[in-house]
Image (tube, grey):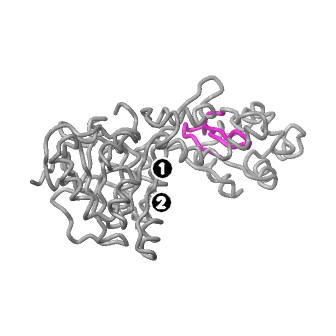
Amino acid sequence: MIDKREGLVSTAHHTASAEEPHQGGEPAPSGDSHAAGGPDRRRSGPLAGLVVVAVEQAVAAPFATRQLADLGARVIKVERPGGGDFSRGYDRTVNGLASHFVWLNRGKESIELDLKSSEGRAVLETLISRADVVVQNLAPAAARRLGIDAKALVDRFPRLVACDISGYGSGGPYADRKAYDLLIQSESGLVSITGTPETPAKAGIAIADISAGMYAYSGVLGALLQRGRTGEGQALEVSMLEALGEWMGYPYYYGCYGGTDPARTGASHATIAPYGPVATATGEVLVIGLQNQREWRVFCERVLRRPELGDDPRFAENADRVAHRDELDGIVADVFARLPLPEACSRLDEAAIAYGRRRTMEEFAGHPQLAARDRWRRVGTSAGAVDALLPR
């Protein structure tokens, strides 16, 4: 039957409690997303005509498969009975639906299956037999018990592109640990270099999940391209720890080869100065960024209007400026504290110094650049249309 629960279009409904998808999301927020009205038989895009089966929850796998849906693939999301994807319950902020779920599940169809029952497993096997791609983020042991780990699937269906997403990978001592975004941010070292000197902090978004989802998405696209050439499918495996770990390349090299981890500097850059937030006289916060010596001298002359600072030995090179960051930040803050926003922006523009506004979510939604490029689109949910940034 068609199940429009929580805004997703469902192609079938089987009750009971499914094998719990885990790994890839924070253990607490709620939500919902879209595709109101019924399966779209007129999909367009480079992946139109392809079918993706997604046994997924939370963020990492849904982020990967939502991008496949955005490119035209038909994505059938398999959810457990009695609540479905647990991100449906993270919050109720989007007209009663969950912000995570709305963000991650547009354009998908949903089927509720009890994967502990023979009937549910038979339905899933039929779906997979007709699919081009399977993405799943069950715990590795659970996926193996069900026979839907990527290797087992490609053994049964040689043309299939199958992708496993887990916290730590299918082997090793951490393989079956639960893995949520904050835990992976911590295990990868990200939390240790983020925040203020006094307080380590996580990134404000689920960056470990997103990194895994991005590598799953690009890996699936690459495997589909290869299948077009060879006719053969491929088994892929993405670990949240390894995905985020690759993004940690700069602090890894800096810390392991330099002997000291990058300092926690709040919203400022750890190894470049001046590079960070400054408050204007009218209360708005700008974020400025300088990249080289020429920009530093121009900044002193045209923005600070204190050209003598360009020759001050405390600030001669970037390494000196970082070493004397507190003094330099105080000088810069004092100048900007006397400049209303229009004058501060005018000076920075005339000097061709890079800067941005520290915006709230509401200010981002009304960003003039996005409006000028007509980037917002209305997408449907069971609770009404919402705005979304869609790929062109």
Q: Position of residue 322 (x, y in %)?
A: 78, 38
Of residue 330 and residue 338, the one placed in the foreground of this image is 330
Of residue 6 and residue 308, the one placed in the foreground of this image is 6
- Inspect the magenta stretch and tell me whether residue 366 lies in it: no
Of residue 139 and residue 200, the one placed in the foreground of this image is 139
Q: Which mark is residue 219?
A: 2
If the image is split into quadrants, where does the C terminus sit? bottom left
Q: Left or right? Give the position of 173 relative to 287.
A: left
Q: In the rendered structure, which amino acid carries the disc numbered 2?
A: Gly
The residue at the point 79 percent across, 39 percent down is 258
The answer to whether residue 384 is seen in the rendering is: no
Answer with the quarter of the image where residue 256 lies.
top right
The answer to whether residue 169 is seen in the rendering is: yes
Q: Main secondary structure of the magenta part?
A: loop
If the image is split into quadrants, where does the N terminus sit? bottom left
Q: Which mark is residue 238?
A: 1
